Structure formats: structure tokens, C-alpha cells
Image (spheres, helix red, strand yellow):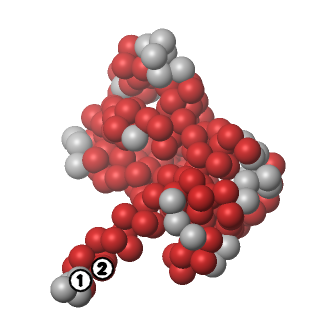
Amino acid sequence: MPRSAAQNDAIRTATRERLLAAAMRRFATDGYESASVRAIAADAGVATGLLYAHFDSKDTLLLALFARSMQQVRGTFDEAMQAAPDMSVAALIRAAVQAVRADLDFWRLSYAVRMQPLVVATLGAALDRWRDDILTALTDLLRFDGSARPDLDAIALFAQIDGLCQHFAMQSSTYPVDEAAERIIARWSPAAAVSP
């Protein structure tokens, strides 16, 4: 009996997810430059030709992985915007930690991959847009919270959240992420607002 359209879609989605997971592992272990499309396909248990049915190139795989991380980051901002104005930064920090905790393997590999020079060069403008989007969203959030210098505060807060999440992803079994997050939250609370 032939498969239904829904079954075919489910198979395509599952194959795409296996390819993305295999690509992330290969990029992290072999390095983006050395990871081959053939090895990625083999790790995912599919023929190389099937990989190309889902992704045009290794660069397209990288961009899809990058888009996934952006989707998760946007979700943390959605949570923060639902919080009361004086709690939005706290909500953002807690949501960021939860996003990493919920998909720890992905974020561990993502941080390892994103530091590679060829990855930075390949992502190029997409990485710049991502950084600008994050800084704009943080600036808006901090302006909403009453920051006197939301542009500078956004840069500082971005560094703290990204550093917190990276350290947690790389040292998840020993890193006191919840305690560190609460310390950062306390520093960004309205009572401890950064001076202009």
C-alpha cells in the first residue's frame, strides 16, 4: 500500500533531522572545512544523493543549523516579552538557560562549530544580521525596562547571556548555571540598574 502524503512528509522531516544532527556532529568533530558531505550522509544512514535532495551543499546544511539556533534564540525573546517590564531581563536569561538545557547536545556542538574561522566566514552576512537582530531586540527590551543607555547595556547583557550559555553547554555537569544566572539577574534588576 502506498504511503500517504503525511507519511511521506514525516519521513522527509525525520531524514532532514538526521542529516542536520549528523552535520552538526561532523562539523564539531572534524571541523567544518574537513567534514565531507559523504561522511555526513553516511552518519545519517542515507545515500549522498538523498542528502542533496534536502540540502544543496554543505554550506546550506550550515545555514540550516544556524537558522535552528536563531529560532531557539527568538523563542527566548518571545518569553521575555510576555513578562512584566521589570522582569523581562530575568525572563530572558532564564529562558536562554532553559533553551540550552532542553537541547544541550545541539548547543554544545553549536558553540564548538561557531568558533571555527571558516564557519564565521561562510555565515558572513547572516552572522552579522543575527548579531544585529539580537542587539536590536536586547536594546528594545532594555529601553522598555527603562535603561538610560540601552545600546551599551545590550552589548554587555548579550556578552553575559552568551557567555553563561556557552560555559553551561561546554561544562554542563559541573557548571552552576542556575546560580550564575540568578547572579546576573540580580545585577540587571531595576534596583541594581547600570548607571548611564
* Quarter of the rendering containing residue 184: top left
Secondary structure under the numbered disc 1 in the rendered image: loop
Query: Callout 2: few (<14), some (14-19), or many (20+) C-alpha neighbours within 10 Å?
Result: few
Q: State the image coordinates of residue 174 (x, y, percent, origin top left).
A: 48, 12
Reading the image, the residue beneath label 2 is 8
The answer to whether 155 is drawn above or below residue 33 in the figure is above
- Can residue 126 be spotted in the picture? no
Task: Give the number of marks.
Answer: 2
- Left or right, residue 141 beside residue 154: left
- Left or right, residue 97 beside residue 124: left
Name the residue located 57 percent from the left edge and 41 percent from the top edge: 109
Cα separation, mark 1 vs mark 2, equals 6 Å
* Quarter of the rendering containing residue 177: top left
Q: State the image coordinates of residue 156 (x, y, percent, origin top left).
A: 59, 34
Q: State the image coordinates of residue 46 (x, y, percent, origin top left).
A: 52, 66
The answer to whether 192 is drawn above or below residue 37 in the figure is above
The amino acid type, in three-letter code, at marker 1 is Arg
- Can residue 5 be spotted in the picture? yes
Q: Earlier in the sequence, mark 1 or mark 2?
A: 1
Reading the image, the residue beneath label 1 is 3
